[in-house]
Image (spheres, rainbow, N blue to C red):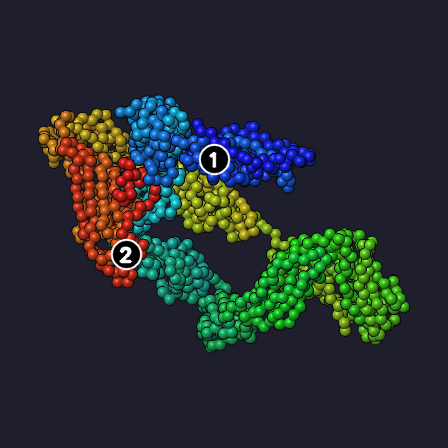
Amino acid sequence: MRFKRPRFQASFGEQLEDRSMLSGTPLDLDLSAVPTQTVFAGETLSFNLGELGATVSEGEDGPRTVMYQLDPDGDERPEGMSMTFSGDFQWTPTVEQEGLYSVKIIAVENGSPVNADVEEMLIDVRVGRPVVDLNGEDQDGIDYNALFQVGHGAVNVVDSDLTVSDENDAVFQSATITLTNPLDGADEALSVNTEGTNITAQYSEGSILLTGEDTAENYALVLQSLTYDNTNPDADPASRIVEISVSDGEYESSVATATIAVNHTPDLQPIEDQTVEAGQAAELVISATDPNEGDELFLLLDVESPEFVTLTQEPGTREATLAIAPGADVEPGEYVIRVMAIDQYGLADAQSFVLTVSAVANTAPTITPVDDQTIDQDTGTDPLAFTIGDAESAVEDLTVSVESDNPALVDPAGIIVSGEGADKTLIVTPLAGVTGTATITLSVSDGEETTTESFLLTVNEVAVNTAPTITPVDDQTIDQDTGTDPLAFTIGDAESAVEDLTVSVESDNPALVDPAGIIVTGEGADKTLIVTPLAGVTGTASITISVSDGEETTTESFLLTVNEITANTAPTITPVDDQTIDQDTGTDPLAFTIGDAESAVEDLTVSVESDNPALVDPAGIIVTGEGADKTLIVTPLAGVTGTANITISVSDGEETTTESFLLTVNEVAVNTAPTITPVDDQTIDQDTGTDPLAFTIGDAESAVEDLTVSVESDNPALVDPAGIIVTGEGADKTLIVTPLAGVTGSTTITISVSDGEETTTESFLLTVNEVTVNTAPTITPVDDQTIDQDTGTDPLAFTIGDAESAVEDLTVSVESDNPALVDPAGIIVTGEGADKTLIVTSLAGATGTATITISVSDGEETTTESFLLTVNEVAVSPIAEADSFATDANTALAVDPAGVLTNDTGESLVVTEVNGDAANVSSPVELTSGATVTINADGSLSFDPTGKYDSLAEGETAVETVSYTATDATSGTSTADVEITIAGINDAPVATDDAFATESDTALTLTLDGVLANDTDVDNGDTKTITAVNGVAEDVGQSIVLESGAVLTLNADGSMTFDPNGQFEDLAEPATVSFSYTMADSHGLTSEANVVVTISAPSGVANENAAPINTVPGQQATDNATPIVFDEGNGNAISVSDPDAADAMVEVTVSVDNGLLTLANGFESFRHKLLGSIDQINSLLNGLVYTPSAGFEGTATLTLVTDDLGNSGFGGAKADADSVLIAVAAAAATGGVEGSADVPATEGDSIDSIVGSEDELDDLFNPCHFA
């Protein structure tokens, strides 16, 4: 080994080390714990000195802070080597730099360049580490991804182009293959083929050790044969990790990793046979499962399914909705519907069911019954509601008639039927003065069928005066500022003349319609009413017409609705930015603009509120400005810091708009003088005092209670100390100044607040004018009150007085600004003399706020005091009641709105939880049996047995229980159970197709259950019996000759004998014979299945391999902007078949000489090579899309070549080749398809892909099963 040590002749490092010796405490760098570092040429060596064990001696003051660097002399340091000040080293040596290097490291004490130390470490650069590349040299990286399909055999773990190399061209000694995460025990294994090499494979618990001296080519050959297999049908779906490395005896390669994705076949849930009547619709939820949680499942409907069956799947789900909607013109009969679930890797599961479409049968209409009625003489029945309907006919096509069997009591004119749609109303009015009974018959007809309902009408004789009659008036809707059309009505009376009757009309909403707006005209029995609402008013009013004969009164009401014509829009306000200020300061003037589309600016009301009155109270908010332009100044309370949301509101009286901004007040850490808000100059009359003068004190550092407030007058002859009263708690103070009696003049009033160190004063001028007029009375304030709904206040005391008037000469009144909450009857004032008591009682059931204003008057002056009364709503919890429903094992249950809420009590109830979970609302909840129930927010319910009760026999029942929580508008909740009883019914058996095989000279005999062995019946105890062969009951148990000449005997117990009967001699290829049988259960329900028998030549006699067959359409035509889709629906499908390939693999190449081909799975290229079964390949070809190249005009040729790979018999592989000519014309507008090109394209980079351009995939393509 070569040793390279750079020569240092008074290098910078040595010089620096010499200088460091002048330091009082020399720095000592210790690299003795740092091991020699080994790196291979072409690889990167990275490390941190400290993490490798480098240390530095402590200084006089403790641990040192040092900077590392390599010796700066460039000619002594290998090229490419670098190190950061923190000791992070990096170097990628070249092959030419092989050898052992002694590298000098310099440590310099940070901030003291004269204190340093230099030490050396060794780095060994080597050439020739072995390399294993799992996917070959033509792919990036050395790792590989593989796909294992459970149940489809072993899969290659590495690419067929795997390489093993060594720059030293050394022979290899060993390789290690490790399955790092075996999850299925002995069921999974790795395997290699060492045949023809000197390599021995040793297997041990998922790992393989390859040993033996051999060439790189042979080690590569053995590793290329590496496969993974797992025979557990329930294999764990987690990906397996295989690590592979090789060794030449001296060095070992880096580990390459193969990741094996384990994919399972989806499981599509069975689908029961369905029956739907033509013209009706039904929906089924189809679901599939897959152990691979990350797999995307596609639920597909057989393309041959009838058009009235559709399947809809939400992307990303594993469920789909199968909609069945046969039109009334669909031919009745049985349809076989096939559904498939396929994952993104092509594994699929299919289920089929029989859909029976039954003929449309006309049913008779329906009519709800009417109870027997008893009325008095000379009256009519109340409106009698009934409902009509028909399963096949629209309601408007039905004819309703009503007859009386006693026309002397009720004649046709006395029968009136009204109502729209299905809901009808009947009023029966007997002839005047007649009594007795009549049978009233209601009939509804659809033109073919008629349904009747009858009830008995009894008219009792009454010897008293009967009430007058009045015909009804329909509800009316008019626009604002208009009146109704003339509304006709008729009055009458059995005993009185019309002119003796009195007619009156009233409105229950005089604010909308007052008496002046009601005009009644007309002579005799025929009257006309016109109603005109008040101008500008909208809303509703009940208009009641009354007619009286002096003793009896009859009324008829109708609802008048007056609609508003133009809608008011909300005002506008410009936003204000968030503000930050210091403690004890205010904001700058903050400008904002208001406006309104319908209202003048002066009619708008602006208000500003703070959500933190402890920081900003109303006194600290000042809004100024005229017109639309406003200015806001916010001044927080003294000494207070924090944040407050300031909300500006503008209202036009109906609509309100708000804008908010955040005010942040920062603390200032210095002692500041206290603050006091100013008081305006005051002018009062002689012998009066000031109103309470509010002012606020504060201090940034002191609590309010630690501040001292004093007030002085500079004119004690006008105001002496006894006339100054300061009240209030906390920061909010009130000052009342009362001059001496009879004195006038002026004085300066000075308010002072002190924190013990600093004092702040505010002064105002008080002017006392000489007045010889009456002063206003006085009244003490009442605090705001809060009470519960349907209660009244406690007695509220207040005191009145007057300087000139006696108390008994004062007048007290109280008003509410919200009569809908508190009306005058709810206000009671008591008390004698100056002391009064007020009790306020809110209206029953009402909540909200009202301002209560107390007024006292001396006849000239009036004084008021107001307080806010708040009436809180008292919530009533809802009550949920238990529900019970019933269905049978095969019938889904649907309960319409309000469903489970129907018998519950509460306002605006909704379902908010199912089984205690809000996420279950409107979602299917799986019960313990596996059945599902869905309860929606509106209370509707659906229950799907999902086949989980098929084993219930007739007479047996099962019960499922689910809970729900009902929530009302106030968030009150109540929970109840829903009990669903499921009754068992007999289910039809299910016959399953059978397949058997025999040789042409050997009879096939089945004993025991025979063809019935795989047939099922969910009803325990039911027997299964063969009842017909090929539809003929008499052939059961008889020897019959089939069309092929073979002889069949199929017995009732399922046992069978099939004799080829010498009809299949000299077979060139296997032949099949099929027949059907019908099986029945103990209750006579039946199911049919097919049996296929495959007859092959006797053992040892091979059949000749049959050639595959391509099916292609004739010449196609398109333009270069329009792709062509080859599928069965377009009548131009491309497919392949092979008489004897069965499920064996065949190879199909489909290509085009211009443009691109896209398979049904989305892969795109100009050439695709497919390897798989006939069915798998046809699933990719059905829906093949040809896209012409951009701008191409001419004829393109699509070529299809199928090779059966010699799957069966003798004669070797057979092939079939066909082509389709495609005429491509220029497109009228775009001239081509955007994005197309004359180059191959592929999707995905997995080498297990079964598609791709031949040029790109020939070297990567690894035969794999696709299902």
Compared across the picture, whether 121 is left or right of 421 comes to right
- The amino acid pointed to by label 2 is Ala
Numbered tag placed on residue 1190 in the rendering: 2
Residue 24's x, y, as percent? 68, 34
Kindly identify the residue that appears in the image at 32 percent across and 34 percent down: 162
User: For the point 67% across and 33% down, which residue is it?
Assistant: 25
**Residue 187, disc:** none
Question: Where 789 sits versus 226, above or below?
Answer: below
Q: Which numbered disc flags the more N-terminal residue, 2 or 1?
A: 1
- Going by the image, does 556 lie left or right of 829? left
Q: Which residue appears at 20% of the width and 50% of the height?
A: 1197
Residue drawn at the location 29% of the way across and 53% of the way down: 1236
Q: In which quarter of the view is residue 1103 placed?
A: top left
Tell me if I can see residue 1147 in this picture.
yes
Going by the numbered disc 1, the residue's amino acid type is Leu
Q: In this view, which residue lies farthest toward the front?
A: 9
Q: How many marks?
A: 2
Q: CA distance from mark 2 to mark 1?
A: 51 Å
Would you identify the image quadrant in which residue 573 lies?
bottom right
Say the numbered circle drawn on residue 45.
1
Task: Left or right? Give the position of 106 relative to 372.
Answer: right
Residue 506 seen: no
Q: Nearer the viewer, residue 663 or 426?
A: 663
Residue 539 % position (x, y): 53, 67
Residue 1030 image position (x, y, % from top left): 17, 36
Q: Callout 1 environment at 10 Å: few (<14), some (14 to 19), or many (20+)?
A: some
Q: Which quadrant holds the N terminus? A: top left
